[in-house]
Amino acid sequence: MHGSRLEQSQLLVAIAEDHEVYRRSLMIALEADPAVVVLAEADVAGRFGPVVSDFPPDVICLDLSVPSGDAVDAMTSLSVRLPKARVLLLIGPEDDPGPGLLAGAAGSIEKNAALDHGLAAVYRIAGGGTHLDARGAAAILEVADSLDRLGRLGLSSRDRELLTQLSVGRTADELEPFFGRSSGELDRTLSELLSAVRDAWSGFVTDETSDILVARAIGHTLHQSTASTAVDSATR
C-alpha cells in the first residue's frame, strides 16, 4: 500500500494469487495507471490483513486455483467481509470459471491475458460492468443453454449470440458496433444476463430432482446412489 491516505478518485484493488512472481507482475501492470492502488496482496484472500477493512477494495483479483481450498468458498467469505467488493477471477489453463461466476464473480480473465488486459477488466468491473473472457462466456453459455432447454431460463437469440461471440474470443468493445449498443448499454446487458443466469441456476439447484436433471442437461457424471434417489423423487 502506498502511504496511509488514499484519494477518493483512486481505484482500490486487492490480489489473491499464490504465485508470488505472477502476483507482483500483475500488481505492476495494474499500478501502471496512477489511479490504481493495489492495497493488499497475498497468496489467499484470507491473508489480506486489516488494511482491507480500513480501505475496502473496489475489485479483488482472485486466483481460481487457490492452494488451500475452494475459490467459491473464498468468495462466500469475501462477500461477508467485503460485501461491496467485486471479484475478477484469475483463471489458469485447467480452471473452470463457471462455478465462480455463478457464485457471484463479476468476471473472469486468463492469467496471461490479465498482464496486458487486466487493467481494462478491473475498470470495467469497478464501474459496475461484467468482464467475460472466452472461457467464462463459454461456461455461462453452457449453463444458460441447459437452463433454457429445461424451461428455467428464457434465453433470447440475441443474448445467446452475444455469449457465443464472446466465447470465441470477441471482446465486448469489438461487439459494441455489431450489437448497436454503447459501452454502457452492453455492460448493463451482460451484467443483467449473468444475473439472470445466476438467479435461474440458484432456483434450479434447490429442486429435489436437480441432480439427475443436471446430469441429463449438462452431462455431468453422478454417483449412482445420488442419481437413483433423484430418479425416485422425480417419478413419485
Image (cartoon, rainbow, N blue to C red):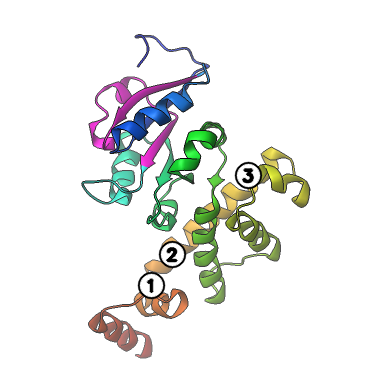
Reply yes or no: does residue 56 show up in magenta.
Answer: yes
The residue carrying pointer 2 sits among few (fewer than 14), some (14 to 19) or many (20 or more) residues within 10 Å by Cα, namely few
Q: Residue at x 31, y 88 (%)?
A: 232
Please say if 151 is above or below 131: below
Instruction: Mark 2 and mark 1 in contact? Answer it, CB < 8 Å.
Output: yes
Residue at the image point whose x is 31% and y is 48% from the top: 65
- Disc 3/disc 1 C-alpha distance (Å): 29 Å
Between the C-alphas of marks 2 and 3, the distance is: 22 Å
Q: Amino acid at mark 2?
A: Gly
Query: Mark 3 or 1, which is nearer the eye?
Result: 3
Q: Amino acid at mark 1?
A: Asp
In which quadrant of the rendered view does residue 102 lie? bottom left
Coordinates of residue 45 in the picture (x, y in percent):
28, 36
Q: Residue furthest bottom?
A: 235
> Would residue 118 appear left or right of 75 to someone viewing this image?
right
Mark carried by residue 149: none
Q: Nearer the viewer, mark 2 or mark 3?
A: 3
Mark 3: which amino acid?
Arg
Query: What percent of the width, then of the height, locates residue 157?
Result: 69, 66
- Name the mark on residue 203: 2
Above or below: residue 28 compared with residue 190: above
Q: Earlier in the sequence, mark 2 or mark 3?
A: 3
Residue 84 in view of the camera:
no
Label 1 sits on residue: 207
Residue 236 image position (x, y, % from top left): 34, 90
